Amino acid sequence: MIPDLKSDLEKILSESIKSISSVSGGCIADSRKLELESGKVFFLKRIRNSCSRIFDSEKTGLEELRKSGAVNVPEVVRKGTDFLLLQWIEAVNNNSNYSMEMLGRQFAKLHRYRVKKYGFYEDNFIGYTPQLNKPSKEGSLNWATFYAENRLAYQTSLAVKNGYASLKMRKLMDNLIKKVPDLISGTEEEPSLLHGDLWSGNYLIDKMGVPWLIDPAVYYGHREADLAMTSLFGGFSNTFYSAYKSAYPISPGYAEREPLYQLYHLLNHLNLFGSCYYGQVISILKRYAS
């Protein structure tokens, strides 16, 4: 750790730091376990590039999730220009039915926390990628417009800029965007608070079996978009989905719409990690747009 940062943290915490050890996970931040002489433990994240706004967004996202009263999130102890100090959660490898059922019920409760307009009062990030949350006037009141403009069209524009979008992909996307209203017709709901990036690496289970959500990319949108991310890379059991659906049933035909919502995250992975995700993007585009 940079000596000046250690000194600053000791001033913030009014106590000497006993040890600092690396923690695995995440490609955006350098993660450390910070232990004080008193035995108190914190989670320290340091940004790996100059984009300190990522931590501003993470702090805001955690605070928004906490407002719902639905899920557990770590407390933000302090945010600096290049670091974020969080409550330490002693995570264990526990995907028991008890924990996954609790997570499913809490996730459903989160989605019952609603507002009147889609989006969010500020843009934030999903990974390193800016996430545009400020919609057009129509998009603020119409989910199909919001999803088409702020999610699919924006990620496609980045793919063009990054050299990952072929002419074929662009034509398919143009066709899909025209079809989005019909594809999701009949599923309309008021905007739900979404975690925004809930894959298996963004929840923890503590020693008591209690789930915690971390690393949000929050906005208010259709809850099916949040559910679709949970199934993209695995890590959520049938118990989780059964508990969710029991607490908050979803509209018929969700399985057919799920890849449409996964497309946003695959486009983001295309932009973040390169052409290895191109085939999956094209496959979904052909499914809906051909």
Image (cartoon, grey):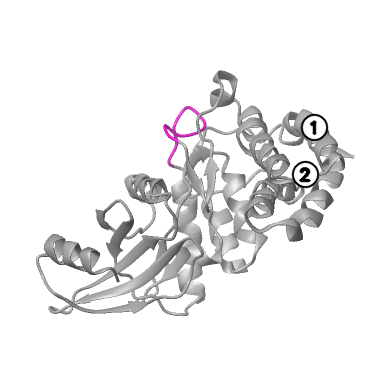
Residue at which label 1 appears: 174
Q: What numbered label is drawn on residue 165? A: 2
Residue 232 or residue 167, whichever sits in front: 167
Labels 1 & 2 near each other (Cβ < 8 A): no
Q: Which residues are magenta?
A: 113-122
Calculate the distance from the C-alpha at mark 1 to the C-alpha at mark 2. Answer: 12 Å
x and y, in percent, of residue 52 in the image: 38, 49
Residue 46 or residue 92, whichever sits in front: 46
Report if residue 207 is visible in the image: no
Q: State the SS at label 1.
A: helix
In the drawing, does residue 146 fall left or right of residue 175? left
Q: Nearer the viewer, mark 1 or mark 2?
A: 2
x and y, in percent, of residue 57 in the image: 40, 46
- Vertical placement of residue 140 versus 158, above or below: above
Q: Residue at x 36, y 62 (%)?
A: 46
Q: Residue at x 90, y 40 (%)?
A: 290
Residue 280 or residue 179, whichever sits in front: 280
Magenta span main SS: loop
Check if residue 121 falls in the magenta segment. yes
How crowded pointer 2 is (Cα within 10 Å; few <14, some 14-19, many 20+) is rated as many
> In terms of image quadrants, where is residue 238?
bottom right
x and y, in percent, of residue 108 in the image: 49, 51
